[in-house]
Image (cartoon, helix red, strand yellow):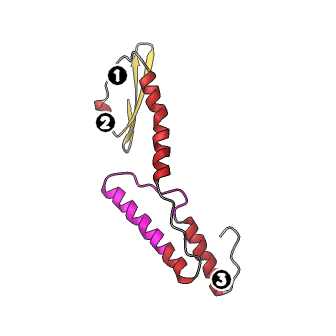
Amino acid sequence: MVCRHGRVWAARLQAGRVTVTAAGRGVGPGSVRPGLVADLEPYLRGRGEMPGRLAERHRQVPPPDPVPAEGVAAYRALAEAALGSQARLLAALRAGRKPWRRAGEGGHARAVAAREQARISGIRCRSGW
């Protein structure tokens, strides 16, 4: 039995009294062949190294530019953040990759723009904005 969802799949095989479940992403289930493994250590080491590589890649991403906090500059920063996010989304879709957003992307720019709108119009800003 094979279950698919986009590029992710899972299969369950019965071999006598043993049930084997395999899952994959980025490779077709037809390219996977079951076999005996004499030593699990390289697989476990590789599994442990993956989070470290991801964390290192995350550390290499530069922090976002500070959002201007006054007047039209706050709105320009919000528009640039939204357009940049949309461009990354379209590029990922065109390349066949799953689009993703950076944590907190655009949230600070929206909050600054909302505070500026409240300040300019003379109204009180809701808490949390």
Position of the N terminus, as image quadrant, is top left
Q: Is residue 97 magenta?
A: yes
Q: Which residue is mark 1?
A: 34
Position of the C terminus, as image quadrant, is bottom right
Q: CA distance from mark 2 to mark 1?
A: 14 Å
Q: Secondary structure at mark 1?
A: loop
Amino acid type assigned to the residue bearing label 1 in the image? Pro
Decide: marks 2, 1 in contact (CB < 8 A)? no
Give the total of numbered labels.
Answer: 3
Where's residue 21, x and y in %?
43, 26
Amino acid type assigned to the residue bearing label 2 in the image? Gly
Q: Earlier in the sequence, mark 2 or mark 3?
A: 2
**Which region of the structure is painted magenta?**
78-105
Q: Which mark is residue 28?
A: 2
Q: Earlier in the sequence, mark 3 or mark 1?
A: 1
Where's residue 51, x and y in %?
49, 39
Q: Is residue 30 above or below residue 89?
A: above
Q: Residue at x 43, y 26 (%)?
A: 43
Where's residue 36, x and y in %?
37, 16
Amino acid type assigned to the residue bearing label 3 in the image? Arg
**Picture quadrant where residue 110 is located:** bottom right
Q: Residue at x 59, y 76 (%)?
A: 69
Q: Which residue is mark 3?
A: 119
Q: Residue at x 63, y 86 (%)?
A: 120
